[in-house]
Amino acid sequence: MSAHAVMSTPPAAAGSRLLMSGNEAVARAVWAAGTRVAAAYPGTPSTEILECLAGYPDLYSEWSVNEKVSLEVAFGAAMAGSRSFCAMKHVGLNVASDALMTMTLTGVRGGLVIAVADDVGLSSSQNEQDSRYWGRFAHVPVLEPADSQEAHDLTLAAFELSERFEVPVILRLTTRICHVKGVVRTGERSAHSAAGFTKDVGRWVMVPSAAGRRLPLMFDRERRLRAEAEVSPLNFAEPGSDRRVGFITSGPTYMHVRESFPEAPVFKLGLSFPLPFDSLRRFAAGCERVVVVEEVEPLIETELQAQGIAVTGKQILPLSGELSPQVLRPAIARLLGEPVPEDSTVAPMKVFPRPPTMCVACPHLGVYYTLSQLRNVTISGDIGCYTLGFGQPWNALDACISMGASMGMALGLDKGRGDNEKERKIVAVIGDSTFLHMGMQGLLDIVYNQGNVTVLLLDNRAVGMTGGQDNPGSGRDIHGNEAPRVDFVRLVKALGVREERVHLVNAYELPVLLKTLREETKIPEPSVIITSQPCVLIPDYHALKPYTVIDERCTGCGNCIDVGCPAIHVTRRDRVTKASGREVDLAFVRIESAACTGCGLCLKPCAPDAIVHVDTLAMPIKVVRKTTAPVQNA
Amino acid sequence: MSARCKYDTTNILVVGTGGQGVMTATEILAEAAIALGHDAKKTEVAGMAQRGGVVSSHLRFGQKVLSPQISPGSADVLLGFEAAEAMRWRHMLRPDGLVLMNTGRLVPPIVELGLFDYPDDPVAEVRAAGTHVVSFDASAIALELGDIRLGNTVMLGAIADHLPFPAEVLESCILQRFARKKPEIVDLNRRAFAAGRAAAAAALRAEPDAA
């Protein structure tokens, strides 16, 4: 759902008992904290925080072009004394980290909270990293909520801590916080005015001499924060009657531990960095053994061991994924030498996999159907819906690591060609928002260094994978209001791509797309092919008259299935022996007309003209006439 | 160290594919539980769900809910919006749990391409595994009422008599939600709810081992 669809209802009254996701609860608390500036780039599982915030009054919110800019915007506001906020997924903080690593030296004036959402369990990400490392790396505190109510309460606490210690605070969320809905009691908004920016070059201009003077302040702040962690109400021990194992937990693992071992002593860390070593040492002394349950890396465990506190953790628990009750119960039973509980021993039934698909009529379908017809090509991919092009039936994406990386990887694939790859075509595929996020610089590098790369820039006017959010290429801001729109043709020309090498092609015009791709991959210089048909999930997309299949005409060739549209279904399979003696599998099809939006992509590979508009069926079926003329969509 | 002895929690697992309204249906169930004063948590395993992938939504409610996740073998009811998806998650059900299964099928491209087979008879296969199944064609009911999107209300109707609270509480939550968002389809949803409830009841009566 795009942001402008969710806004408009006034915030619920204080004290309301609401069913809220962790993301919604964070947004509510950011607003309640009197925050004046909030920025983010969409990224699962953090996206809904800013989508919700955009609906709250008296607060500036924006979609930023990338996470680094969002953090810089928030930091600027905090320098001016405003409470400010930014949200990102885990890999976003990698991008933003350059800014973070120095703002920890300057510190902040207004409270600055950075919500970073780790995708523990990899529901929608390219890696599973532990953002709590950034707290250690940047010497900033880390708060870890355990459910929606805590997501709300710890967000408020994070602002208070940030202002009291003049430090950016990391609010570390995981998918199991962001996307769990639970009951939340909310509060009123408190007003916070901004004192305004005060010039102070020794503090705000981080040249070496000034930065060197700030370093001791940073380390002193960490010492004071550690003392705070000892007395903070966010950190507490819960006694238990079964002291054979005590648990130290942070984040959602607290709930999993309480669920699994209701009688065990538990130390809950809400402020999980810096660690309160003294409190934890006392807790450990009261238990026969202590297990640290943390997602996902052994950070707390390692630091406690270095303090000489006897704990275990990753020796008995997995190094990746969620530590839910089904994981914890058997691991602790084994530790205690007890029989492993049997409730999780039923094997799942065997069912076909159901990977995510591209949408019916998605403009990327035509692009990947076309790419799948190219031979002797390496396709460098990027992050977005179009990453799905690696899968069936297209198999037309060969590499993908991080936002914008398709550009640099393609140049490297060109410059580092193997001896057997002299004729290999190098194609890079990137979406509009990803290009603006971090791809532009890569294209500039391709142009500057004269790479033999053909770039396919798929402009669908939305951040598709996260639900169709707006970006500088969509011409709308976070509220859906009109905003300046990037002209991609002019932009890539300005980066230095020669005019003759820039093509704007309709993603549904398959022959033109194929011809352009073939030509451009033959020319040994940078070229960019831009498609600009909108994402089918956004209002810019207009559905056309749906199609259907005339059974009598379908020859079962199955070519249309290779487009990969989820509206095409097989009605009957057969196997025939051709005159040549070759056996051929046939698949006769129908189109789910209720789902079809008439893009016409499946018509192009259909030789017998078996696919027609639904209303054509009302007329008598004419004799099949072969035609090569393009069929109109409308 | 069993959790059930301390907290009496109801576990409902709602499964289907992206776009079927699984998450919305679970949210309405959660709202109904909260309206009755329960604590509730709802969570999804929904990797890129809106791209037609697998969605399984967990709802736990009771006096106090800790972990949001239902452990394998502990769901009380499995509400399957799609036949093969109900099969996929059957192991989450406790041994005496109940599957309410839409027999309507959503066949993904990966099956249409001939790379995998769709199960011949999901209802029979789940039954053969020893699980109590109540099955009906919710998709057909929704289409008969004029819109496949009514499927999730039909499914909520089907579960309404298998909850630890009266069906009318759930019905009023659904109707209030539509009254807020799309008042013009309140009546249609009322009919979809009733049709789902009737279909599940009829399927239950028709069973050879009906209790």
Image (cartoon, grey):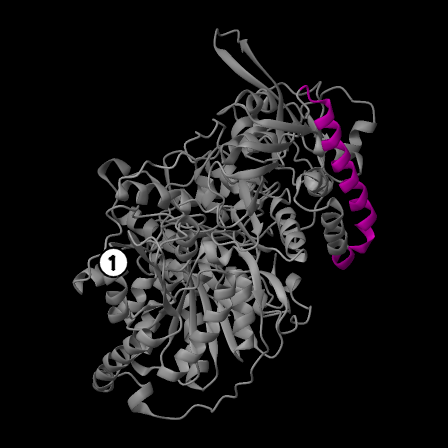
For the C terminus of chain A, the image quarter is top right
Q: Where is residue A510 in the image (x, y as percent from the top left)?
A: 56, 39
Q: Position of residue A322 (x, y in %)?
A: 39, 49
SS at mark 1? helix
> Which residue lies most toward the front here?
A241
Q: Where is residue A77 in the image (x, y as percent from the top left)?
A: 46, 81
Can residue B142 be seen by looking at this rendering? Answer: no
Q: Residue at x 32, y 74 (%)?
A: A229
Tally of numbered discs: 1
Say which of A609 and A152 sits in front. A152
Q: Which amino acid does label 1 sit on?
A: Glu
Say which of A263 and B20 sits in front. A263
Q: Is residue A228 above or below residue A291?
A: below
What is the magenta range? B179-208
Mainly helix, strand or loop, the magenta region?
helix
Can residue B166 be seen by looking at this rendering? Answer: yes
The residue that label 1 is drawn on is A301
> Residue B54: within the magenta?
no
> Residue B182: within the magenta?
yes
Q: Which residue is drawn at 22% across and 38% down?
A: A419
Say which of A611 and A56 sits in front. A56
Q: Is residue A124 above or below residue B85?
A: below
For the N terminus of chain A, the image quarter is bottom right
